[in-house]
Image: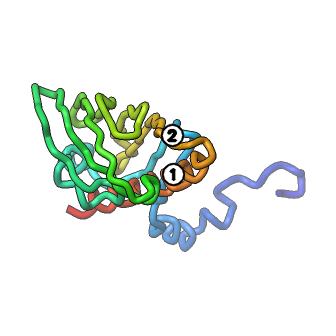
Amino acid sequence: MVASGTPTPISATPAATPSARASASNRVEQPTLSGRSGRYRASIVVNATPQRAWAVLSRYEALAGQMPDLQQVRLLSRSGNTLQLQQTYQAPYTFGRRIQATLRLQEEPPMRLNYQLIQGDDLRELQGNWTISPLGQGVRLIHQLQIDPVVPAFIRPVYDELFEANLLQSMRLLKRLMENP
């Protein structure tokens, strides 16, 4: 605060000094997560072109084994920009069980990917979208989803906590894959 009681301009704060700006630019962008109880929005800034981000995101079968929960992906069908995939998940939030889900995907390259559950083991609902939004340099990768697992109510808080940790880890891994060709 300056003597008059008005807020100090941002340019006068320590974060605006050259060394602080250099330090800030070297920081690794961390994902943000909002929502709870199966309704989430995760976001992260990625230093990549929309085309590069899309190329990584849409290599469905190649992501199996690289993502923390995605064990297997099989393309069942493709008709233009509409696909059906079978995915097998296994992670702490599945409590060690292998969960299979068949998804319908609608691609809008290179900016958006919508998906919806057709059939899944122990899942009442799984739907969402990925959005790649261009920034001045790079893109913002956003994943919005709704998931409703078939788990006992007393386990749901543990499930949610494990799922949220997995979602954040997945965003960090996608950032790394998109930035390092």
Camera-side residue: 179 or 98?
98
Is residue 12 toward the left or the right of residue 159 in the image? right
To which quarter of the image does residue 147 belong?
Answer: top left
Label drawn at residue 164: 1
Q: Which residue is mark 2?
A: 40
Q: In the image, is residue 179 above or below residue 111?
A: below
Q: Determine if residue 111 is in view.
A: yes
The residue under the point 45% across, 65% down is: 28
Expressed as whole percent of the image width and height from the top left, the position of residue 88 reads: 27, 49
Expressed as whole percent of the image width and height from the top left, the position of residue 104 reads: 25, 30
Q: In the image, is residue 42 above or below residue 22?
A: above
Query: How does the figure colour the protein chain or chains?
Result: rainbow
Q: Look at the numbered disc 2 and give the secondary structure of its residue.
A: strand
The residue under the point 32% across, 62% down is: 176
Q: Residue furthest front?
A: 152
Q: Residues within 10 Å of mark 1 (few under 14, many from 20)?
A: many
Q: Amino acid at mark 1?
A: Glu
Q: In the image, is residue 137 above or below residue 123?
A: below
The residue under the point 59% across, 68% down is: 17
Find out whether the residues at labels 1 and 2 contact each other: C-beta distance under 8 Å. yes
> Is the C terminus in the top left, top right, bottom left or bottom right quadrant?
bottom left
